[in-house]
Amino acid sequence: MLIKGARQLIGPFSWPPGSRPFPARPFMRLPLPSLPIPARPSQFCRQLASVGALPQLTKDRYPQVKRGSFSKLEQTHLQFFRDLLGSNRVITDEDECQSFNIDWIKNVRGFSQCILKPKSTEEVSKILAFCNNNRIAVCPQGGNTGLVGGSVPVFDEVVLWTGQMNKIINLDETSGVLVCQAGCILENLETFVGDSGLMIPLDLGAKGSCHIGGNVSTNAGGLRLVRYGNLHGSILGIEAVKADGEIIDCLSTLKKDNTGYHLKHLFIGSEGTLGIVTKVAIHCPSKPNAINVAFLGLKSFDDVLKTMKQAKQQLGEILSSCELIDEASLGLATGHLQLKCPLGVYPFYMLIETHGSNNEHDEEKMNTFLESIMADGLVEDGTTTNEVSKMNNIWALRERITEGSTHEGYIFKYDISLPTENFYSLVPIMKERMGESAKVVCGYGHIGDGNIHLQVIVNEFTQDALNKIEPFIYEYTSKLKGSVSAEHGVGFRKPKYIHYSKSPEAIALMKELKTMMDPNGILNPYKVLPS
Amino acid sequence: MLIKGARQLIGPFSWPPGSRPFPARPFMRLPLPSLPIPARPSQFCRQLASVGALPQLTKDRYPQVKRGSFSKLEQTHLQFFRDLLGSNRVITDEDECQSFNIDWIKNVRGFSQCILKPKSTEEVSKILAFCNNNRIAVCPQGGNTGLVGGSVPVFDEVVLWTGQMNKIINLDETSGVLVCQAGCILENLETFVGDSGLMIPLDLGAKGSCHIGGNVSTNAGGLRLVRYGNLHGSILGIEAVKADGEIIDCLSTLKKDNTGYHLKHLFIGSEGTLGIVTKVAIHCPSKPNAINVAFLGLKSFDDVLKTMKQAKQQLGEILSSCELIDEASLGLATGHLQLKCPLGVYPFYMLIETHGSNNEHDEEKMNTFLESIMADGLVEDGTTTNEVSKMNNIWALRERITEGSTHEGYIFKYDISLPTENFYSLVPIMKERMGESAKVVCGYGHIGDGNIHLQVIVNEFTQDALNKIEPFIYEYTSKLKGSVSAEHGVGFRKPKYIHYSKSPEAIALMKELKTMMDPNGILNPYKVLPS
């Protein structure tokens, strides 16, 4: 196991400056390492995807999936794209295409021979109108940080990459509304609105690479949904291009607008299969004056649940994150990425964060909460801090688990919503089920929202391993009325499993919508909809 | 004017017990009346609609709207309904039908001769399948508290009333998720979840009558959107019945569920034209431990804007309402409904409310905020309280304006979103435009969300008065990129104006959706979609 090695890096006790000790009870505390703020995992995404052993071609690994009756790319098609975009925004070099063909966790690989890099809505509109008329399949791609193979081609689809649509259009500081193109990188937007005292109501590990258009198209959830809600609530407006090239302008910047059907929601979470999002308007709340983080070690899942309940009650309106990390998940981050953990070894860790407007009030609420969980004997050890670099170090332990996992082997990754009391139940069941065939079985995620990320890591992909996991994991989730895709979406890997979470009538309605919006099926084929 | 008469009711200065004086500066303060908690306006809705002078039949007032080619109701149809529901849930008595035919602000009147009262989703399904097969038009109706004529028939549509679908199905106290039928009255739900320390994240003046299904179908906004967000964010699941009777079960109770298209949003805000909502799952946040209300008198709109900005900054995460009432609007509540105002006469009033988990912290934040706006000379007078009966009395001044207005004459009522700096600009413009022809021109509403309710009240409806207001008011709103319906929806009265806020392509997509979901157009015809 990795964990032991990682633990040896941790030195003896001393209080890191800026950290506040837990009141009232002595803890065994370990120093926070003074590392530079770690690079976000997502900054590695494209590199990771293109280096090392190539994953098997998707068409070979999943031979049951058949190429649709789309046109093969011809020189006349390429000429149209070059006339429209110029040669340097039409990529056909095989090596250059490679990183757009592979997802960053190396689960799937397509073989597109053409990457298009439009800069404007009008260019997207002309590309789609042409592709629709010529029956050319299109795979929209943003930061390519998805985890279900939704953003890479399955066969030879043309990739429409949004990275050059990266302009900020307007920020209204009074109302807190940001309008920008779909290809803006989430972290860049965060920095931009931060200068005006605002924040983006979405944060996730991949923020250094992911595009806001991709976030919206996949209804990304992330680390602070417990406080700032989901994108259906905070996206005020969307401009999108339909498969036939028609531009749908619903780019309202108003908090309230009940003039007819709420069309923007067709594009939130439909993973580019109903249209390509080109611009978004986002409501940005005020940046908190005070941020506090507590990192806790706990001995049982029952204690985790009780601690969460107290966090919700006592931290109330300032609770901005409530995350769980199990021992094995932490080991993947500490073992492979030289990250240090400030606590000893425990079966469970919780990361609890507050965002508030008054640091004195927030610290008091946090201290009261910590005192109360200590008095109840719910935590074994913990540290709390409001120093930026230390908070980043703690957050890295949570955010870089996926990155650490890629060094361990082939990842079977599941993103599941379960009723709170059953949140962790799948992990021990899967551990037993996999036995020696898995290197690691671990679980972590957004317990505050009932969303666990379960990973089964093996040396390399085998059908046997897959058969041990699926469909069992989905059947289990379905029985508990959970969701087989909480926040990662359906993409390529899950269409055949959505019936575990959606009724036949709902799936039929999805298909009717798809037929209405994209009658030729050119937009992101083989994704989302079951065949 | 009413205002003078109302003011005479106010007695000399004394501090009401439980109110906290503004710190640091003496104010001229007036006592809060010790009235019982006033009845909600909505409790009067159905009575108001059915008593007094009847409004003109819609078909006569708007002769340009032609009856669709739907079947006329026949005895065989009635027999089917009676066989399905029993005689006592099929209303055909003319007097009994009356209140279902008139909206409560007496703007529109249909002449339905049949009211159906299903109790279950299955009954709704059978009714719609039958109506679809027999081309019978259906008008869904909940609490009938809408303000745009969306919930009453235009001609002889069968009314499907949800009032007997009023069962609570489940409340999960740990996750805070309530599942209930569509006909539950909002206030009843509030009381029910309140017993478990939770609250419904929606509150509006009509809560004593409105049904949650109607709230969802109209994407109701209400008084606390600034804090708890909109229904697209807080509705977790929906069960709805399509025009052909098919039941779409998207009744997820999970906070995160990205398994395919987010179909529930088709039904949120489409005003019963795409399907009839039969069940909802709502995320209920914790009930606040502390509620504080401040009621302020201000001399200019510029001061209102500055006060709002400071409220957002200083009250941050606990700000739960930020409402504006102008002098004339307040006069309608105090003059007609024996409500008393604790402050003197000012051009503007603001109601600012906080919801928080720690009263000491919240009071400190509120006091700091009040001190700061006083030091800046932004408010002329004010009172603050956390006593329930006094908070209710203050809230009644805001919530009962519409009810008071019905006593004044015929109301032309507009519900508009405008950029904050232009929020109030329409009121003086309309006042000048109407001149002597209007009894009252006033504005009030949710300034925290940029949503104003503008009223022009005349002795009785005249086409001349209407022509003075429309389309001018919509053209003005459109020029400022506002919304011609912020929260009330489109209903019967606004379809021809939605092009002021929606592009032709978006309207075309709405029509495609309608054709797909309801090819015979039986669901709430003449509403929402422009002809």
Image (cartoon, coloured by chain):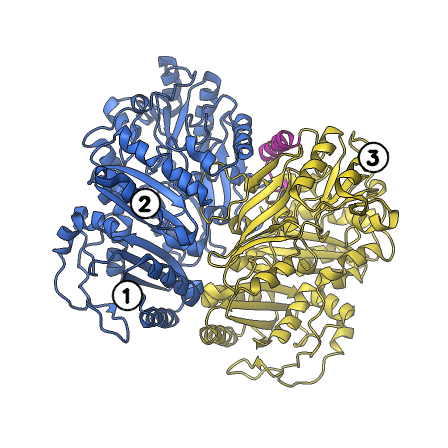
Chain colours: A blue, B yellow
**Is B160 one of the magenta-colored residues?**
no
- Going 70% across and 36% down the picture, which residue do you hit? B126
Secondary element type, mark 2 = helix
Task: Say which residue label 1 marks.
Answer: A384
Of circles 2 and 3, the one toward us is: 2
Labelled disc at residue A419: none
Quarter of image, res B130 = top right
Q: Nearer the viewer, mark 2 or mark 1?
A: 2
Q: Position of residue A472 (x, y in %)?
A: 37, 37
Q: Which residue is mark 3?
A: B73
Element assignment for label 3: loop
Determine the chain carrying the residue at label 3.
B
Q: Position of residue A217 (x, y in %)?
A: 44, 38
Q: Nearer the viewer, residue A198 or B430?
A: A198
Residue at 67% across / 60% down in the picture?
Answer: B205
Q: Is residue B410 visible?
A: no
Query: In terms of secondary structure, where does tag 1 sit?
Result: strand
Residue that carries the numbered disc 2 in the rendered image: A429
What's the CA distance linking mark 2 and mark 1?
A: 33 Å
The boundaries of the magenta stretch are B500-518
**Amino acid of disc 1:** Thr
Q: Give the amino acid type for the residue marked by disc 2 in the picture.
A: Ile
Mark 2 and 3 residues: CB-CB less than 8 Å, in contact? no
Q: Chain of mark 1?
A: A
State left or right for residue A528 relative to residue B171: left
**Residue at 33 percent of width and 37 percent of height:** A147
**Mark found first going from the N terminus, 2 or 1:** 1
Along the viewing direction, whichever of B63 and B182 lies nearer the viewer: B182
Residue type, mark 3 in image = Leu
Left or right of residue A480: residue B386? right
Whole-angstrom CA distance, mark 2 to mark 3, is 59 Å
